[in-house]
Image (spheres, rainbow, N blue to C red):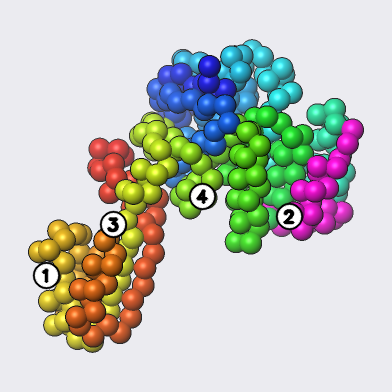
Amino acid sequence: MSVIEINHITKDYGKGRGVFDVSFSVEKGEVLGFLGPNGAGKTTTIRQLMGFIKPDSGSVSILGMDCFDRADEIEKSLGYLPGEIAFIDSMDGMEFIRFVAKMKKMKDLGRARELMDMFELEPSGKLKKMSKGMKQKIGIVCAFMQDAEILILDEPSSGLDPLMQNRFVELVLSEKKRGKTILMSSHMFEEIERTCDRAAIIRNGKLVAVEEIERLKEGRQKIVEVTFGTAEMARLFARQIQETSRGEVSLREGDRTVTARVSKNMDGFVKKAAQFTVTDLEVRPQSLEEFFMHFYGEGSK
């Protein structure tokens, strides 16, 4: 039996908003990424898992229990980080952590203090004066301090700086080694790529696919911009790439910069470019939207 099961859920808010016939599951000990652009339906799905809203049709269960009818029981073995955390602004950060611990009937804050050290969190300031990143750190501490077997995380690294994003990835990987079951939503491919076994991909409220992360990595291209010494060099190179690689290449008339999508054979691409005078080279991974368009095509809109 899967730990988390989502079976054909629909929650229709009208005008194309909501989620429509979504189904996927999370196995015990798995980290599953829930990937999609902002507004795709990730939070709506997670709110149904948390028992906050009931699907119009279909069912959601955790450990075989209906998420709406038995939400109180499920929460005993669940750590949750919402996309928008409801803070009590009159409290300071430590008061809020103790408040959440009391609700979870926790007496030992040892794990919470470990997490505060990990994220360099000084929680004594008033919540209403804290930055988004500071508040996010408090949310992470509250989600993980219970040492729950199941974690549901909605955009967990939102607002964190790159160093703290790396710390968060390290935390998820360490929990994964301990056998935790984690569902983690994100619009950042890199975060999912580094932590997850599989990804459920949602777009405009509909599930596009559930894929092994390795397959997604293989399908993701790099966007390469090469600037040549002359416009003629750029034109010759672009034609060569189109003829030999059949890759997507763009070049404006008279421009010296060629933009191309490159999959696995980066070495061959660079060697072809090196036949000319290269004055600049920039490489970046595809954005999530670019990845959708390439990997799933127009039909996945």
Choose the circle earlier in sequence order: 4 or 3: 4
In this view, the residue in front, 161 or 204, is 161
Q: Which residue is mark 1?
A: 239
Query: What residue range appears in magenta?
Result: 107-132
Question: Whole-percent x and y of residue 14?
Answer: 42, 27
Question: Whole-percent x and y of residue 72?
Answer: 72, 19
Judge depth for marks 3 and 2 and give the one in front: 3
Instruction: Count neighbours of disc 3 (C-alpha within 10 A) and say few if under 14, some if 14 to 19, many if 20 or more.
Output: some
SS for dot 4: helix
User: Which quarter of the picture shows residue 228?
Assistant: bottom left
Q: Which residue is mark 3?
A: 263
Q: Is residue 264 above or below residue 90?
A: below
Instruction: Count neighbours of disc 4 (C-alpha within 10 A) and say few if under 14, some if 14 to 19, many if 20 or more.
Output: some
Residue name at image x 45 percent, y 38 percent? 199
The amino acid pointed to by label 3 is Ser
The amino acid pointed to by label 1 is Arg
In this view, the residue in front, 267 or 253, is 267
Judge depth for marks 1 and 3 and give the one in front: 3
The amino acid pointed to by label 4 is Arg
Question: Whole-percent x and y of residue 286?
Answer: 36, 56
SS for dot 3: loop
Give me the C-alpha separation between circle 4 and circle 3.
19 Å
SS for dot 2: loop
**Are discs 4 and 3 less than 8 Å apart at CB?**
no
Q: Does residue 205 appear left or right of residue 262 in this picture?
A: right
Residue name at image x 87 percent, y 54 percent? 124
Q: Which residue is mark 2?
A: 119
Give me the C-alpha separation between circle 3 and circle 2.
36 Å
Judge depth for marks 4 and 1 and give the one in front: 4
Question: Whole-percent x and y of residue 296?
Answer: 29, 41
Q: Which label was assigned to residue 194?
A: 4
Q: Examine the structure image and report whether residue 191 is included in the region drawn in magenta.
A: no
